[in-house]
Amino acid sequence: MRLSVGNNLVGLSLLVTSALFLQPCRAIFEDDAGQLDFLIATTGHGPVKFVATVGNTAVVTSDFTDDATKTSCYVASRKVADGTLVWRRNVCSSAADEQQYHGVSVSGNFVATVDHVGVVQAWDATNGALLWDVYLPTKSNHRLSIWAFAKAGTHYIAVTSGSDTSVFDAATGTATTSPSAREAHTFKGSSGTQQPTEVYCDALDLTVGADGATALSAWNRKKDKLPFQNQIAFPPEEELSFFSLLSCSTTAMEVLRTSGRGTTTMISLTKTDSLNVSGEVMWTAEEGLSRVDSAIMLDASHSGVDLEQDKKENLLQLVPRLKSQVMAMTEGLVNTGNPVRRDDVFGFLKIALLLSSSSNRLYGIPTSGDTRGKTRFQVNLPAGAEWHRLVHGASNSIKSGHGIKGGTHTREVLLLSSLSSAREKQIQWTCLDGTTGTEHSKGSVTLKTAVSQVIPLAGSGGCRQAAVLILEDRSAIVIPEDKVTKEAVLEQVAMSKNGFFGHSMRKESAELEAFAVKVDRNGDLSTMVVGAIAFPGEEILSVAYPSREEAIQSPSNALGDFSLLLKYVNPHLMAVVTKTKEDGKEDEFSALSGTRKTATSKRKPSGASDTAEVEPTVSTNDKPNFFVNIVDSVSGRILYRASHTNVASSPSPAIVISENWVFYSFTNEKTRRGEIGVLSLYEGMVDSKSLTAFSAPELSSTFSSLDARESKPVVLAKTFSLAKSATALGMTSTRGGISTRRLILATIDGQIFALDRKVLDTRRPMGQVKDTEKKEGLQQYSELIPLVSYTSLSYLQLVESVASIVSSQTDLESQTLVLAFGGPDIFFTRTSPSRGFDLLPESFNRPLLSIVVAGLLIVLFVVKVSCVGVAGGSIATMRCCV
């Protein structure tokens, strides 16, 4: 018996031990797919300009036109019936550049494309499969032109460059001389890029066009206008709508309406009689979402700052407080089937604001509820603007021991659009509620010079969101320009204890300038230059800042020997990614990179040291061409500079800052693999013996960025390799910063992964792991980071060419919301970096729990009654019952 018990205890201990060391499974069940996430798949090319039908079931679209000098790289197909994306292909053979262009033509079930390099490709129009491709060198100053045609039941593809024309069999790609080049030109007719404002169906004797910009109009051959039984209205458009006739029969006609801002609408029209027309919108697609530049997520639940005061005042009253408690108890015990209310309570209800500069439009999309992933509202921005900016929140706080706290939970946002002409420059601004799209106020300001920097600030006038515009002549203006807002901004600047700072950057000349913003004697804002940085021979690729929503739980890391490693937390930190120019000078490059022309490095032979302690071989022949500069934006000083060699220009390097960590990704041209560089910044260390109950070292929670000795961090660096290159990086964000942080990366093959930050720790030892390091959970350094399928947030979804990833916190510490965008797809999901330790699953059986609790209460009541009945007979019995 004792042996059996011992074996059971040993087995139980082994089970518990294995459970502690196993990684938690992060995969999802098939039934859970699509419940907490959504995917918006667009055609990728933006506003439709090319339309061709494939039978009566699909339509092929692109942004190609005959006179276009630059296009996207995408050609796609949608179902005519419901608008479902059938296939989408990137038809460019090289990375995007200023000469990016493609041509397209359709004949039968063949789609022919050609890019600016000269690669001709043939695709199956039904499923998008590549049939064949061939390279045709282009002549200087001549662009390839392509068209597909049919002759005697056989389909051909013709390509011309200047006076040279080549003809191929569309099915096999074989070059042919029959038909000849001259005969092929006789088939070169309409390319499908005509953009008529009206279309005519002969079988129905019906012409359809735009009635102004907001409605549909129809008339017959006699030009008699026919009334609609159900009028189809469209949102106001500043650009003309175009129509394409997809099908025409004696019963109905199908028309595809496209707009310059990217809205595509499929319309079915029928004649109820000779005098009336009936129209129906079959589906609508927002192709402008394929070119999103920036995005934020606003809280649309009770946690909005503008509603907090009303909520607090309401809870001070007895009756509303009792009602809220009863509703909370009812919702907790019984599942009422109202997920929207739960989303409101937990802060899951967000509105994603997506800004598309190419489409000149702002989109508002809910991330929860029945309408998640569907456009709630659209805001049209001025067409022809040089740039658009979405301003939200406030600037960095002075103290950031537990995060910047940039006030990013307010609902109002400020939209800025820069317009310029030969005479003047103008900024048009609009203040609106970011959760509903309601416009609060708008206006415009005339400027003398261009804007070099936009600093967000809180407002208290007609708009609760304000901004300070720093101009190129170093002057500053306040937007909105009303008196109340200006006084509020001046007060914030004047009340800044340690000063109010900003910076401007010129990417063309690779220069950065730091300045202090002050209030002068006249009560206006003025600037004073504090520092400047120049990167001669280099160009700025991207810039990254700390997240203003990020919460920092602890300012230090506890080590295995009980000492503390102090984090370097600087709210004014920024990372500037630069790359050498092709025409950079040799001596300037060598001086900046810190390398010599004849570099030699003496190292121990491999046999003279322990194999676990041998450092990796470093090549001294290759010169660095990629740099990551850690900069203090207040003083304008470079705190640290990392360099790498053989960095490819595509995909574009990505970078993100989290707490005292800097993560950046790039692709190595030699190894053909993706790499992730990691920098961790620290102030120093506190020994375990220095912290006792009676003594502690003298430490300060603040330091001056202008003091070079105080603001200089200790930097640890490591580089890891990936089997796939990364296109974008992000970091999970939670309410209190307690949950484990995970690095979110989008790969070049269209997947999104979440990696534990411990895997990318810069303190991972090169040799054997010590006992103190094991206590911290550190593992021995391994260059290759595996991307396991169960860590994929996108599971089987294809999210192509992601350029940016943002995250937002909720009211639950375990949950974080992730939004990936920038390419033809937009993906949203909810994830648990440390698993859902504070949230019951949606499938939790609340009625059963209520029944069990009620049964226990009844049993307890019966037992108490029995105890009272026998209490007089025996004291021992009474004690037992009680």
Image (cartoon, rainbow, N blue to C red):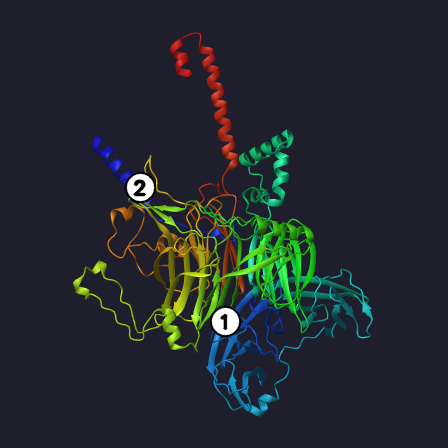
Q: Is residue 393 left or right of residue 555?
A: right
- Pointer 2: what residue? 690
The local secondary structure at tag 2 comes to: helix
* Residue 253 against residue 480 in the figure, above or below: below
- Which callout, 2 or 1, points at the residue further toward the start of the chain? 1
Residue at the farthest top position: 873
Other residues around mark 1 within 10 Å, as few (<14) / some (14–19) / many (≥20):
some
Residue sitting at 44 percent across and 68 percent down?
Answer: 578
- The image quarter containing residue 518 is bottom right
Kind of residue at badge 2:
Ser
Question: Could you classify mark 2 by the number of other residues whose Cα lies within 10 Å: few (under 14), some (14-19), or many (20 or more)?
Answer: few
Q: Quadrant of the N terminus?
A: top left
Q: Position of residue 374 (x, y in %)?
A: 60, 56
The answer to whether any part of residue 644 appears in the image is yes
Q: Which residue is mark 1?
A: 509
The percent position of residue 257, horizontal first and vertical second, equals 67, 68
| Residue 520 horizontal/vertical position (percent) | 61, 55
Of residues 157 and 490, which is closer to you in this image? 490
Residue 688 occupies quadrant: top left
Q: Could you tell me how far apart the alpha carbons at marks 2 and 1 are, in whole angstroms?
A: 49 Å
Q: Which image quadrant: the C terminus? A: top left
What's the residue type where badge 1 is placed? Ser
**Quadrant hosting residue 210:** bottom right
